[in-house]
């Protein structure tokens, strides 16, 4: 995810969210990763990463429950 922020500036919450999603899919560029490590605060990435992981797990769980219900199991 390309950011329109000025160099040396702290990333916004949307930038952090985009970086977390990109890294979860394995498409994070090395330039963005370096920017995250140099200008971001670790707790932001940890909290957003945990929230995205929980939402992902709950989504998978919900889809499985729906398919099982529709299959009559």
Image (spheres, rainbow, N blue to C red):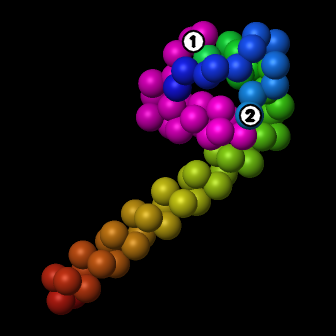
Q: Residue shown at 83%/31% (left/top)?
A: 41
Q: Which mark is residue 61?
A: none
Q: Nearer the viewer, residue 27 or 68?
A: 27
Q: Which residue is mark 2?
A: 12
Crowding around mark 1 (Cα neighbors within 10 Å: few <14, some 14 to 19, many 20+) is: few
**Numbered disc 1: secondary structure:** helix
Q: Nearer the viewer, residue 6 or 28?
A: 6
- Residue 33: horizontal and vertical position, in percent? 63, 18
- The quarter of the image holding the C terminus is bottom left
- Residue 16: horizontal and vertical position, in percent? 67, 35
Q: Mark 2 or mark 1: which comes first in sequence?
A: 2
View extreme (left): residue? 71
Q: Residue shown at 57%/53% (left/top)?
A: 53
In the displayed structure, would residue 65 be above or below residue 1?
below
- Between marks 2 and 1, how big is the CA–CA gap? 19 Å
In the displayed structure, would residue 64 be above or below residue 45?
below
- Residue 51: horizontal and vertical position, in percent? 64, 55
Write the start and end of the magenta stretch as one range: 13-31
- Tell me, yes or no, if residue 61 can be seen here: yes
Q: Is residue 40 magenta?
A: no
Q: Is residue 23 magenta?
A: yes
Q: Residue shown at 40%/73% (left/top)?
A: 62
Horizontal side of 37 relative to 53 (left or right) equals: right
Q: Nearer the viewer, residue 4 or 71?
A: 4
- Residue 32: horizontal and vertical position, in percent? 61, 17
- Image label count: 2
Which secondary structure class fits the magenta region best? helix
Q: Which residue is mark 1?
A: 30
């Amino acid at each position: 995810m390309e950011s329109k922020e000025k160099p040396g500036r702290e990333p916004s919450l949307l930038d952090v969210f985009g970086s977390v999603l990109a890294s979860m899919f394995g498409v994070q560029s090395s330039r963005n990763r370096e920017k995250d490590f140099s200008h971001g605060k670790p707790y932001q990435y940890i909290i957003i990463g945990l929230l995205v992981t929980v939402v992902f797990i709950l989504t998978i769980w919900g889809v499985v429950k729906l398919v099982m219900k529709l299959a009559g199991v």
